[in-house]
Amino acid sequence: MGSCHPGVTPCFFRGVGPTGGVATLLIRNGTRFSEIDLKTGLHAAAATVSLEKTLTVCSLYLPTNSQVSKLSLAELFEQLPKPFLVPGDFNAHSPAWGDSRRDGRGRMLDEFTAENDFIILNSGEQTCSFGISFDLSD
C-alpha cells in the first residue's frame, strides 16, 4: 500500500458512505500493527499498534446528519481489543469536551461514556480546528 504522507504508511480508509465521510488511520513507517476488520455501518478504521505496549486505536467519524445509536457504538467497541483509544470527529456538542452547549448527540455520547465507564480525554479547549493545518512530518 502506498504512502499517504512522507514517513507515514499505510493509510486505512474505511467507512466511505453517501455523505463522503471517511475514517482514517495514519501509522508511522516501521511501527508494528495489525488492522482490525470491523463489522459496522459506522465510518471507522482500527488497528492494534505495538509500541512499548500494545494499544488498539479506532478512528471514528460520525457525519453530522447521520443517525447514531448507543447500540451501534457498543457493537463497534465490543470488536476492539483492550485497551483502546477512539479519537474522532463525532460532530457533537457537550461541555464534557469543552463545548459551551450540549446537543442531542452530545447528550447521547455523555450517557454512553458514563454507562460504559469510558473516559473523555480533552484539555477543555475548543475542539474545532477549521482553518488550522497540522505538521505530520515529525
Image: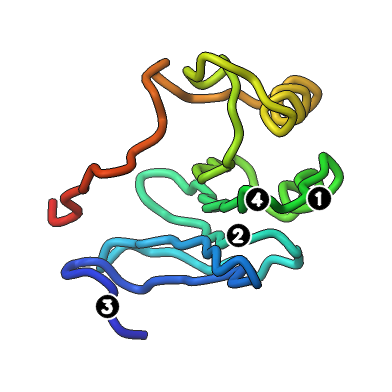
Q: Which mark is residue 3?
A: 3
Sequence-first disc among 4 and 3? 3
**SS at circle 4:** loop
Q: CA distance from mark 4 to mark 3?
A: 26 Å
Looking at the rendered image, the disc whose residue lies closer to the viewer, 4 or 3, is 3
Under tag 1, what secondary structure?
A: helix
Residue sitting at the far right: 71
Image quarter (top left, top right, bottom left or bottom right) of the N terminus:
bottom left
Under circle 3, the secondary element is loop
User: Residue 70 location in percent, x, y?
Assistant: 82, 39
Q: Find the distance from the CA under tag 2 to the CA under tag 1.
A: 12 Å
Instruction: Please determine whether, in this image, residue 22 is positioned above or below residue 137.
Output: below
User: In which quadrant of the rendered view does residue 131 lie?
Assistant: top left
| Label 4 crowd bin: few (<14), some (14–19), many (20+), radius 10 Å | some
Task: Name the mark on residue 81.
Answer: 4
Rounded to the nearest angstrom, the CA distance separating label 2 from label 4 is 15 Å
Would you name the residue on which mark 2 appears? Answer: 44
Taking the spot 68% from the left edge, 50% from the top edge, the residue there is 65
Q: Quadrant of residue 101?
A: top right
Element class at badge 2: strand
How far separated are the C-alphas under marks 4 and 1?
17 Å
Q: Amino acid at mark 4?
A: Pro
